[in-house]
Amino acid sequence: MSTLLDQLARRQLLWQGDSQQLAYRAVASGYPELDQQLGGGLPATGLIDIQTEAGIGELRLLLPYLQQQQQQSQRLLVFIGPPAELCADMLAGSGLELSQLLIITPGEQPAFGQSSDELAKLTQPAKNPQSVKKLSPQQQALWAAEQCLQSGCCASVLLWPAVISLAQARRLQLAAEQGAASMIVFRHSSQALSLPVNLSISLKPDPQGLQLTVLKRKGSWPAAPFRISMQQKWPVLCLTGTAAEPLRQAV
Amino acid sequence: MALFIYLHFPALQLDHLQLSAESDRQLPVALVDLQHQLVQLNPAAIKAGLKQHMGLASAAALCPDLQLLPYQPEQQAKILHNVAQQLYQVSSDIALDKPAGLILRLEGMLQLYGGLKPYWQELSAKLSALTYRYQYSCGATPYAAKCLAYQQAGLITVDNRLFDKALNSSPLSATELSPAMQQQMIRLGIHTLGQLQSLPPAELARRFDSQLLSYLGRLRGDYYHALEYFQPEPGFSRYMELLYDISDSNVLIKPLAKLLQQLEQQLRRTNCQCYQLLLSLFFRDNPPLKLSIGSAQGEYKAQAWLALCQLQLENLPLPEPVYGLQLDVNHFAGQQHTTEALFNQHQARMSALQLISLLQARLGHAAVSGLTLQDQHLPEMASKRSLPLTKGAIGQAVLPLRPAFLFTRPQPLTEAVTINQGPERLCPDGWQLGAQRDYYIGRNQQGQWLWLFRTVSQQWFIHGLFS
């Protein structure tokens, strides 16, 4: 019987539940709880979908991972369409190389370095708009993301999109595989559309750090929600046991 | 013995125009000068029976569907200059003979190429690649070569007797003499150059002006003929007039590709690359639109430049149809090759600089930036958007507890928050106590970590998000 099983297993006709083969190379995330739950860490390539509200610690969760990605391959880190200005102090403080960082803000039109006033004067009275395909900022962001991923000179691309469709996600996933890069998409949890990604997680705020739910994981199945403690890395950004009283109700 | 080749281009401007439109060769086209005479004809027009110096009326009678374009001497001069630049790769001493000729001195070149035949082979290959029609001949002096080239003698030889024979039977119309002088000669019964040269110079000097004698002296090589030899200029500048006005910026790519090909040829020959192109689009009513297209890495391949131009043109609404393109490159730089690791498994498709050029071409320069840390304590001044891939000052102290995202305009606080840490008092430069801010770290009901500050007048604002 066991010879038969061996044969079947060798021909990959038999799949055993206890030996989970990771579909991707994992990079340690810097949080032991997360590494344990995800079988090694976050994927080094491909799409990572993060469903989260802004400002609850989603970037802090990723910083050690991004730092490793950047350092291992000496490649670029690209932020596309961040919700506000990025703070150099915080990023440099967590070990990111600022000169290997690229910020793309789609939709910022006037170009310095060109004869912009002349250009603006000429482009205003355009009566034939049908000849020019103007891309919306959203499309520009996706285009830039695809170019960065394909180029092979970016380690990770972070994208804050308004909305992303199934076909777009598929394209980005292919581009990421091609350029051996990872792409992290931050979405609001309200957009519950499931995407073809390597890893999809949802984050909830927690007094001690973050509450993490694995929604989807390639080559495996989701685990129960668990808590990631940030007490060690960011003690100031965790509530201690005796929660301080709300200081002030603003008018 | 001195030897020269004269190249005569009978229809330079017209041939150049037709380069850009292959499909319309069948159409008879002619150039007309200000006196309404036909100056240059394309093969279809010659086939229809038209001749040079024909009046407009007879031309229209012979060929009703003739297309006419104005003859532009300055345009022709530019093209001739370009031809000289191309031939300079093969031959060193080239003198321009405006409006339509080039004089090539061969003395040094024969030694270099080892004879006239291999030299001519090289030169004619170059000329046929240019696709302009040309007439040529060798000659012992510039004027002799010119005279023979005008008759399409096509002599490629070093034999002096052949030159003399051909020159002696040349008609006066192929010479440099003015039409009035030619008329005078014909009335005297002198029809060929041979007849003229057999007359004693003293007699000629008595009857005619010095112009004739100086021409004959230079023709025979008795007088010195000073030539100003061409010096190639650095950079690249080409103008292309379009046969039709183009109103769609995507269609502009095709003629532009031809210009870029020429640029690539020139760059490849000199083993150079360039970092910036200046593309000017000419409109009938509006002032020309100037675009600068940059590549951070430097390129010489037409394909790479075309992709960058395409991205920029796609975003560009044209105010009206374009009738001409001008491509300028002011500065060439030596080519640099990037080295790659031997054992690196992953091959990058492009370099970081190429990626940045690509993004900038499509999204504009302002949309792509880097980030540098400044030596400032105020949060809004500590982070600065800089040019991509710039290194900031090294060894700057980092303030640890700063939010990842800073709002450019602080937002008023409108909800209950739990303060976790603070205050941290920041005062603007010059101790303006009225503008000092006390910063706190707080958490709101949704679990978001906020960076708050309180002004002197006890107003609360959100300045950032600890993401």
Image (tube, coloured by chain):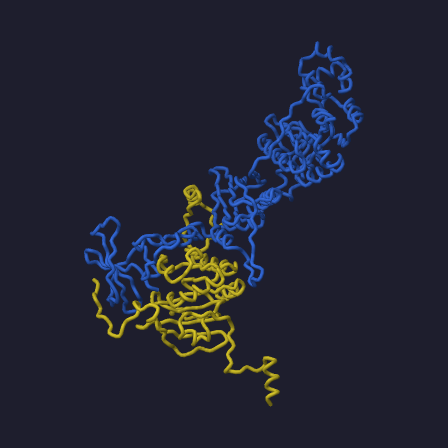
Chain colours: A yellow, B blue
Viewer-nearest residue: B53 or B95: B95
Q: Is residue A185 left or right of residue B234?
A: left
**Which residue occupies the extreme bottom position in the image?**
A1
What is the quadrant of the C terminus of chain B in the image?
bottom left
Q: Is residue B436 left or right of residue B233?
A: left
**Which residue occupies the extreme left position in the image?**
B457
Q: How many marks?
A: 0
Viewer-nearest residue: A176 or B419: B419
User: Does residue B66 lie above or below B413 as drawn?
Assistant: above
Q: Residue B117, position in %: x, y?
A: 76, 36
Q: Residue A153, position in %: x, y?
A: 50, 58
Viewer-nearest residue: B177 or A128: B177
**Which residue occupies the extreme front position in the image?**
B395
Q: Is residue B273 left or right of residue B106?
A: left
The residue that appears at 73% across and 34% down in the rendered structure is B111
User: Does residue B1 lie above or below B196 as drawn?
Assistant: below
Q: Residue B214, position in %: x, y?
A: 68, 17
The image quadrant that residue B126 belongs to is top right
What is the quadrant of the N terminus of chain B in the image?
top right
Q: Is residue A156 visible?
A: no
Q: Is residue A147 visible?
A: yes
User: Does residue A124 lie above or below B56 as drawn?
Assistant: below
